[in-house]
Image: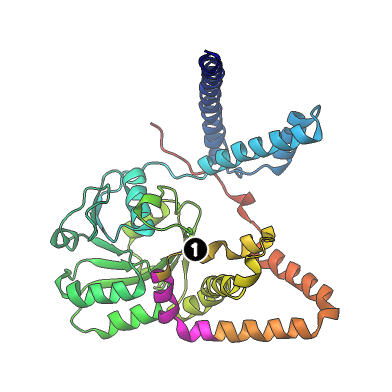
Amino acid sequence: MGSEKQDLSLKAFRDEIDRIDHQILSLLFERLTQVDQISQWKASKGIPIKDQLREKEKIGALTKNLSDSDAKWVESIFQEIMRQSKLYQSKPGVSTLKGSVSIIGLGLMGGSLYKAIRHYHPLIEVKPFDIRSDIDAPLVSLNEALGSEYIFLCLSPHQIKEFLKQHGEKIFHESTVIDFASTKSDIANFVFSYKKFKFNFIPAHPIVGKESSGYEHSDVDLYLNKKIVICDDEEQLPKLLKEVLLGIGLKIKHMNTEDHDQSLAFTSHLPHLIALALVLSSEQQLKKDIVPQSFLDLTRISDASSSLWQDIFTSNQHYLTLAVNEFNRVLIDLLNNVDRLKDAYNKAKEIKKECLDDHSSQEIPFKKPAA
């Protein structure tokens, strides 16, 4: 009997929490309506999304009479609410673009591209193809996928080359193939040297990703406010393709394939290799169960897809080797001059401020079309 009373009491508490949660949800959507109005007003006036003074004043007013512990809790909640509000303001509106797009490979990148185009460009015919049959998307046959105006290859570098070896000659000369792999020179050299290919080819790389992979982790807004490197002349980029990419939230940057691969070797491929090496070299120490947060932060990306990253490392081995050698040189220099580490930290802060500071404070909201 006592257990039944306890169960009933717990249910009553949970029912009350459910009621409060529904009220919170209703208020959040009511708040979002106001955010939308503000967003449209800012867009019409050319006023940036971010207002750091307003955010600071808002947090101050909400936490003014709270204890330090409660203030920290409330601040973290409202910072997330404001972050989501700013994210909403940066989203593109739904377009009226028409055309046909195929997506080969529905992993994280391809699945997210499929969801994004369907959401933001609902009039574009999207034809997804994948060899897996357990994907929750209306897959088409390969022959149907090869007939689109634009064909996105969302595969690893090696898979793209193998796919084109088998099927590239079947692609119409009117079609444009866009590869989304993380390395560019190897694939571009292969495609441009293969004389039997008649299609237009654009090497591209969205600078996005997660530790998790697969369609089940794909996200309609994975590309929102992210850059995509296009390794082609700006004048050569088809207008419809440009509008499709901008319309899912991407920001276009043009760069040649060699510069892309060298840059990504230092800023993406090397960090993944370091994270992997750090875990492997620390195995015995990790067993002592005293692991600080800094280790977890630095090694978070070591859980990434092993097959994908082996492929990336292999296809960009030349520039990755240069990056490793330069990293080792700097690391040894720091170790041999520990008495000057303060100067090194100051220089690193200056580099980060110049190159990595968030400049999104000047971003204007998307002017969404009226419903």
Write down the quadrant of residue 156 in the picture: bottom left
Amino acid carrying label 1: it is Asp
Using the rendered view, name the quadrant where residue 108 is placed. bottom left
Residue at 82% across, 80% down: 338
Residue 323, above or below 348: below
User: Measured from the top left, where is residue 367 in percent x and y?
Assistant: 47, 41
Crowding at label 1, few (<14), some or many (≥20) Cα neighbours within 10 Å? Answer: few
Prevalent SS, magenta region: helix
Residue at screen point 41% across, 73% down: 231
Q: Pinpoint residue 229: horizontal percent, then vertical percent.
A: 45, 67
| Res 165 → quadrant | bottom left
Left or right: residue 318 versus residue 119 is right
How far across and down, in percent of the image, does residue 297 sit? 63, 60
Taking depth in this image into account, of 95 and 271 the one nearest to the observer is 271
Q: Which residues are magenta?
A: 307-321
Q: Residue at x 32, y 46 (%)?
A: 121
Which residue is located at x 67 percent, y 42 percent? 51
Q: Nearer the viewer, residue 310 or 349?
A: 310
**Farthest residue, direction right:** 339
Q: Which residue is mark 1?
A: 303
Residue 262: percent from left, percent from top: 51, 80
